[in-house]
Amino acid sequence: LRLTMNLDAAIENNEFHVVYQPVVETSTGAICAIEALLRWKHPDLGAISPAEFIPLAEETGSIVQITRWVFANVAEQIRSWRRNGIEPRRVFVNVSGQQFIRDDLPAYFRKMAEEETDLVHFIGIEITEQAAIQNMEATVQAIRDLAEIGIDAALDDFGTGYSSLSYIQRLPIRKIKLDRAFIADLPGNDRDIALVRAMIGMANGLDLPVVAEGVETAAQRDFLRGVGCSELQGYLISRPVPPDEMGELLRQSD
Ligand code: G
Ligand code: G
Ligand code: MN
Ligand code: NA
């Protein structure tokens, strides 16, 4: 399968597209952020998950161009929503740790900010805890530079990367996303209850909003509300949807 994946050709042939998943405020249910998720429709193989092709893209170096393509596509979508009278929220793009080593994202966004002042305020990045720990120096510097330009960073898959509190403190991040593995068995699993409470307590102590990922049931939502989780994302609220549908969700949420 991997041998048949030609990622550079996939960009040229327009085989990628982006879907969007809303994140809502726990207290009001209003959409407060959006996650952009990449999709690849291979001409012969059909849909291939980013879980399969992103690791390959990281090996081959194609990840740099793919991420640039995602940012350009998301920027165009934000412009399009705004042209249509829809006020977007900040759209968070998943960024691989390698991007910070192989690409100069701050330079890219500095240029964008010079050309279109407010666009960067609608863009965010998600970086996994694991990637952040592996490239601590490059990541800290890049996230600092991006924050200065107006781009927020969220720490993704939180709780899965064996990070310590000192790491979290060094990273200039704006929110924490609790991995859905911790959410799946709520509210029935005592160990997950203890872990989720502890992680939310820690984040609150650092004044960081927490997003619970993979929220699928009303019981999970009610539990998370009770323990002070500020934002929710998951199938209960909405699956990832195409741009037009996301636009409708934004209209309804205003
Ligand atoms: O959306 P889905 O569940 O298929 O995503 C699977 C994995 O791929 C998730 O870990 C998600 O963060 C990652 N992913 C989705 N889109 C992108 C992207 O544009 N860039 C990177 N680096 N990872 C992505
Ligand atoms: O690693 P990351 O957190 O970026 O992964 C995001 C992935 O999680 C997306 O591919 C998305 O399709 C998936 N996802 C989003 N909401 C849910 C959910 O409620 N349940 C499950 N099982 N997956 C979800
Ligand atoms: Mn993510
Ligand atoms: Na995640």
Image (cartoon, helix red, strand yellow):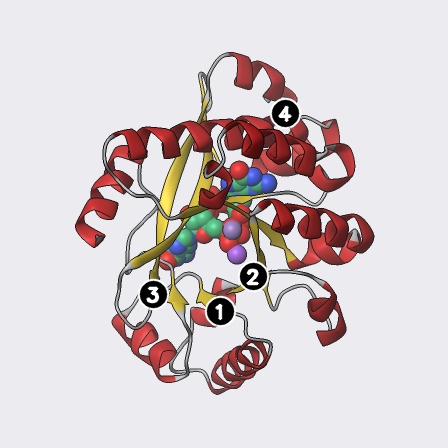
Q: Which residue is at the front of the view, 103 or 119?
A: 119
**Mark 2 CB lies closer than 8 A to ligand 3:** no
Q: Identify the amino acid type marked 3.
A: Glu
Kindly check if marks 4 and 2 are in contact, taking CB atoms under 8 A apart as contact: no
First in sequence: mark 2 vs mark 3: 3
In the image as oriented, which residue stretches furthest toward the left?
252
Kindly check if marks 1 and 2 are in contact, taking CB atoms under 8 A apart as contact: yes
First in sequence: mark 4 vs mark 1: 4
Q: Identify the amino acid type marked 2.
A: Arg
The quarter of the displayed image where residue 201 is located: bottom right
- CA neighbours of label 4 inside 10 A, class few (<14), some (14 to 19), many (20+): some
> What residue appears at the point 30 percent right and 78 percent down from the top-left corner?
222
Q: CA distance from mark 1 to mark 3?
A: 10 Å
Q: CA distance from mark 1 to mark 2?
A: 7 Å
- CA neighbours of label 1 inside 10 A, class few (<14), some (14 to 19), many (20+): some
Q: Which residue is at the front of the view, 164 or 118?
A: 118
Q: Identify the amino acid type marked 1.
A: Pro
Kindly check if marks 3 and 4 are in contact, taking CB atoms under 8 A apart as contact: no
In the image as oriented, which residue stretches furthest toward the right?
137
- Circle 2: element type: loop
Q: Which residue is at the front of the view, 158 or 140?
A: 140
Please say whether residue 61 is visible from this viewpoint: yes
Q: CA distance from mark 2 to mark 3?
A: 15 Å
On residue 209, the disc is 1
First in sequence: mark 4 vs mark 2: 4
On residue 65, the disc is 4
**Residue tagged by mark 2?**
174
First in sequence: mark 1 vs mark 2: 2
Q: Position of residue 188 (x, y in %)?
A: 39, 83
**Residue tagged by mark 3?**
25
Q: Identify the amino acid type marked 4.
A: Gln
